[in-house]
Image (cartoon, helix red, strand yellow):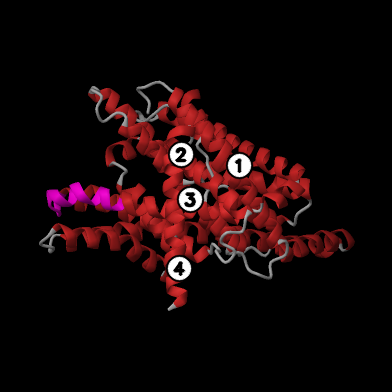
Amino acid sequence: MYHGSHIIITAIILLSIASAGGILTRYFKIPYASMLVIIGLFVGIFHIFPSLKITPYLIYYVFLPVVIFEGAVGIKLRPLMSNVLPIGALSIFGTIISAIFTGVVFHFVLDFPLKQSLIFGAIITPTDPITILSMLKNGAMKHKNKKEDKKEIENREDIETLLAGESLFNDGISLVLFEVFLNLNLHKAAHIFSDGIRISLSSPHSSLYHLYNMFYYIFGIIQTSAVQFLYESIGGSILGIIIGYLVSLILSLATDFLTEIMISLLLAYASLIAAYYLHMSFIMAVIFSGITLANYGFKNKVTGRTLEVFPIVVEYITFIINSILFLIIGIEINLFKIFDIWLISLFIIALVLFSRFLGVYIISPLVNLIKNRFKIFSNGLTLNKRYKRFLVFGGLKGALPIAMALSLPLNMHLRNEIITYVFIAVLFSLTVQAISFDILMKNNNKNVI
């Protein structure tokens, strides 16, 4: 009984602090998420909530599904299909480039084992859809009372979909990469590689045989990783579409808007559970189930009252979740520990920023080239300098990297170091980078966002 009342009291205090933070943002002119993290840092220094801990399961299975679901439901099909090339290329190939580059540089500069370095690269690559979506929502609210022609509306929707879509899909791909790298046996691969080279040099007669075995094993690792990557990402996407379609059919049986809203919310967790048991990406499943619901179920199977009330209900739930989550992130970060390794902290911040820059600026010219060559992609955005700046500055880190870091096996070598480095990147991202991104958005042309 005491334990239950303690949880309720803690939640009330956290929400009260979050409410104060919401009021303060009006005067300090900084993003809500940044304000909560900063407040959380001060709360953490004074150890007001010593027993309050964030767990990966809380983020994975309670917080993320509904937050991602809200973002997915808000994605419109027209701008998504128009910009499927840049969104797909950036979220898949841009993410892979950033993760591998971060891991390789991390390995050589800090002398970390390659496997742990690649895992760190995968952990720190996903962007934070929570902050991005809240900023986009604030930007969209300012346009509600403005008169815009069709071209201006479509242009704004394209930019919003590009940023929100890339952020959401980037999370799904990063989590799959994380699981792939976690399952790699690089130690055995390195052992076989060195043995193959040594035996080939010492025994020329058996060199071809050992070289064949060596490359066969390495190819097997690549093949297994690729199959796992495709199964989890594509499988999760297809699963989400199927579940979203089935739930849309069930919605037609409901007789009141409250039941329709309840069924719609349950879709997020139904997608998660199904993906979990089928070993697929739950993030991809939740994203595609939300997109299917919004663009099929909500257009054909629900009442007008549901369309009016559902966004408000989901927005309120995600607001509560975000408020608690960002406060806890700030409370969990140990500022004194970061100051002790300030030089490494600066290196990690620079590495994470540059890897995001690299992923965006390598993929963007290729996207523009393909767009100009093939008419099927001609309606999408051309990734010019302005949009690339948005994508780089909008590569904010948040809850997902923390969840992935905390979910690392307890006996993993250098686990605590990886967690500390992830917290460093997230702290910088949710404060300095988020404020910079907010300023960039406010100073941007009024027809963009």
Q: Which residue is mark 3?
A: 171
Which mark sits nearer the N-terminus, 1 or 2?
A: 2
Query: Within 10 angstroms of label 2, few (less than 14), some, or many (20 or more) residues?
Result: some
Q: Dot 3: within a 10 Å radius of its alpha carbon, few (fewer than 14), some, or many (20 or more) residues?
A: many
Q: Which amino acid type corresponds to the residue marked 4 in the rendered image?
A: Ile
At a point 50% along the width and 23% down the height, the residue shown is 385
Question: Could you classify mark 1 by the number of other residues whose Cα lies within 10 Å: few (under 14), some (14-19), or many (20 or more)?
Answer: some
Outermost residue toward the left in this view: 255
Task: From the viewer's perspective, tell me whether residue 14 is left or right of residue 268.
Answer: right
Q: Mark 3 touching mark 1, by CB under 8 A? A: no
Identify the residue shown where x is 27% and y is 58%. Answer: 244
Label 2, label 4: how many angstroms apart (C-alpha)? 26 Å
Amino acid type shown at disc 1: Phe
Mark 4 vs 3, N-terminal side: 4
The answer to which of marks 3 and 1 sits earlier in the sequence is 3
Magenta part of the protein: which range? 300-314
The residue pinned by badge 2 equals 24
Question: Would residue 3 be counted in the magenta stretch?
Answer: no
In this view, 376 is above or below 402? above
Q: Amino acid at mark 3?
A: Asp
Magenta span: predominant SS is: helix
- Which x, y percent locates residue 205? 84, 63
Find disc 1 in the rendering and name its residue.
Answer: 428
- The residue indicated by pointer 4 is 7
Give the camera-side residue of 92 and 291: 291
The crowd level at tag 4 (other Cα within 10 Å; few <14, some 14-19, many 20+) is few
Q: Are marks 2 and 4 in contact (CB under 8 Å)?
A: no
Mark closest to the chain's N terminus, 2 or 4: 4
Measured as percent of width and height from the top left, residue 360 is found at: 54, 35
